Image (spheres, rainbow, N blue to C red):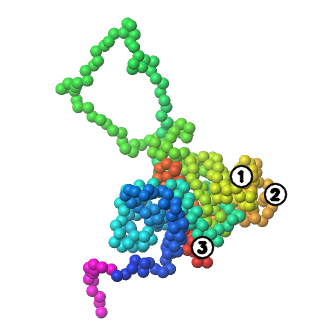
């Protein structure tokens, strides 16, 4: 018997929102870990808000919505609010009821900027890694570090010469006149009837610019769109672009990111950030650790600093003038570190293809840093259902 194509105008729904999500859906495990992690940060949230005023968006729901945006590649907060309006799974993950109103996109953005700072993003990542089911997956001895370029939200046309301070004129506006100076009548600025009407010509919004033969560097030029962005290229044979450098510290057992950072593009930024992340992850530790890295980290000063911090540098050797000798390369653990360190590229690839970090839509190193760290935390969450199912 053929069914009828009738539209149901039911006013009420008696199916619980929890029952609409499949039992084996990966978001169930992710939501459990996120809820436990946010519950451990309750005291941190309490210290950020006052006891009076208009209630803001709950920080737990705001962080869940931001993680959801990264996990499902939602390109903007406006589109996220639109999808939360009709996507029942999004409502279930964030914690909204089926009849709860969705926030205004601008209100959500302002609340997100006030809450998700660099410190809060790091605390969210640390709380997820400290979960009772996640902590046994981590290694305490073997780590890898690497960096990747994050393209800035600024075009090459915005990279213009810096404004130079012009010296003052010899005769300032308040200087006295010379004794023999005569006053000339000022020209009349009142237009006559025969003068044509003046027309203001604005430059073309996206005019063609020829950069051929023009020398540009970070010392003489700066982006008018994002002054924190730097013109940089990481490898020979590639073009320079306005970008930042994102850094990640990965443990080698499960390939989870335990520390993240983002700095301005610089030739020494990767090694400086690597030391900062190592000290931040295990401050004052005397336990021997290993750190795998590529040839870009093969520098004498960096290797010496690692040894002072009780870290064995399992760094790929340069062809000439390498700071890594046979005392390190002869051990079998060195080859294992060189094998496992390449897994960090999977996290960078996920962050750029799924997490939207190929080109950030945020401006300023602080905002881009907090977003990058939260993206690394979302990458860990995306891998947890498979790791915990083993």
Q: Is residue 112 left or right of residue 235?
A: left
Q: Which residue is mark 1?
A: 298
Tag 3 or tag 2, which sits nearer the N-term?
A: 3
Q: Residue at x 72, y 50 (%)?
A: 305
Asked if one can make out residue 169 in the rendered structure from this viewpoint, the answer is: yes
Residue extending furthest toward the left: 193
Q: Is residue 280 left or right of residue 229?
A: right
| Residue density around tag 1, few if under 14, some if 14–19, many if 20 or more, within 10 Å | many
Residue 133 image offset from top left, x and y in percent: 60, 73
Q: The residue tagged with tag 3: helix, strand or loop?
A: loop
Tag 1 or tag 3, which sits nearer the N-term?
A: 3
Residue extending furthest toward the bottom: 1
User: In this picture, which residue range is highlighted in magenta?
Assistant: 1-13
Q: Residue at x 34, y 82 (%)?
A: 14
Q: Which residue is mark 3?
A: 133
Q: Which residue is mark 2?
A: 327
Residue 333 image offset from top left, x and y in percent: 75, 65
Residue 235 image offset from top left, x and y in percent: 62, 51
Q: The residue tagged with tag 1: helix, strand or loop?
A: loop
Q: CA distance from mark 3 to mark 1?
A: 36 Å
Which quadrant is home to the C terminus?
A: bottom right
Q: Is residue 120 magenta?
A: no
Q: Residue at x 43, y 61 (%)?
A: 75
Q: Residue at x 26, y 23 (%)?
A: 189
3 vs 1, front mark: 3
Which quadrant is home to the N terminus?
A: bottom left
């Amino acid at each position: 018997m053929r069914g009828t194509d009738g539209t149901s105008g039911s006013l009420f729904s008696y199916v619980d929102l929890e029952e609409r999500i499949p039992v084996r859906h990966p978001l169930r495990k992710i939501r459990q870990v996120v809820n436990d992690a946010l519950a451990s940060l309750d005291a941190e949230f309490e210290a950020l808000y006052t006891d009076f005023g208009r209630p803001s968006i709950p920080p737990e729901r705001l962080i869940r919505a931001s993680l959801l945006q990264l996990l499902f590649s939602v390109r903007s907060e406006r589109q996220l609010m639109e999808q939360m309006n009709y996507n029942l799974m999004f409502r279930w993950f964030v914690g909204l009821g089926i009849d709860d109103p969705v926030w205004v996109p601008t209100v959500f953005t302002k609340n997100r900027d006030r809450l998700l700072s660099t410190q809060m993003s790091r605390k969210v990542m640390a709380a997820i890694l400290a979960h009772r089911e996640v902590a046994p997956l981590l290694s305490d001895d073997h780590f890898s570090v690497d960096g990747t370029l994050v393209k800035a939200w600024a075009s090459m046309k915005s990279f213009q010469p810096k404004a130079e301070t012009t010296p003052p004129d010899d005769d300032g506006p308040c200087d006295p006149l010379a004794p023999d100076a005569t006053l000339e009548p000022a020209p009349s600025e009142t237009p006559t009837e025969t003068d044509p009407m003046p027309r203001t010509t604005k430059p073309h919004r996206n005019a063609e610019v020829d950069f051929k033969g023009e020398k540009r560097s970070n010392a003489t030029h700066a982006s008018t769109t994002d002054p924190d962005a730097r013109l940089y290229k990481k490898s020979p044979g590639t073009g320079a672009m306005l970008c930042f450098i994102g850094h990640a510290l990965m443990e080698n057992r499960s390939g989870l990111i335990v520390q993240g950072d983002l700095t301005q593009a610089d030739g020494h930024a990767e090694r400086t950030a690597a030391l900062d992340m190592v000290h931040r992850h295990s401050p004052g530790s005397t336990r021997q650790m290993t750190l795998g890295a590529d040839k870009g980290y093969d520098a004498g000063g960096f290797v010496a600093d690692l040894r002072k911090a009780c870290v064995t540098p399992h760094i790929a050797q340069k062809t000439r003038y390498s700071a890594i000798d046979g005392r390190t390369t002869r051990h079998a653990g060195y080859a294992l570190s060189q094998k496992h360190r390449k897994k960090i590229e999977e996290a960078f690839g996920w962050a750029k293809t799924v997490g939207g970090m190929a080109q950030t839509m945020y401006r300023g190193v602080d905002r881009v840093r907090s977003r990058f760290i939260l993206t690394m935390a979302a990458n860990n969450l995306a891998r947890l259902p498979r790791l915990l199912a083993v």
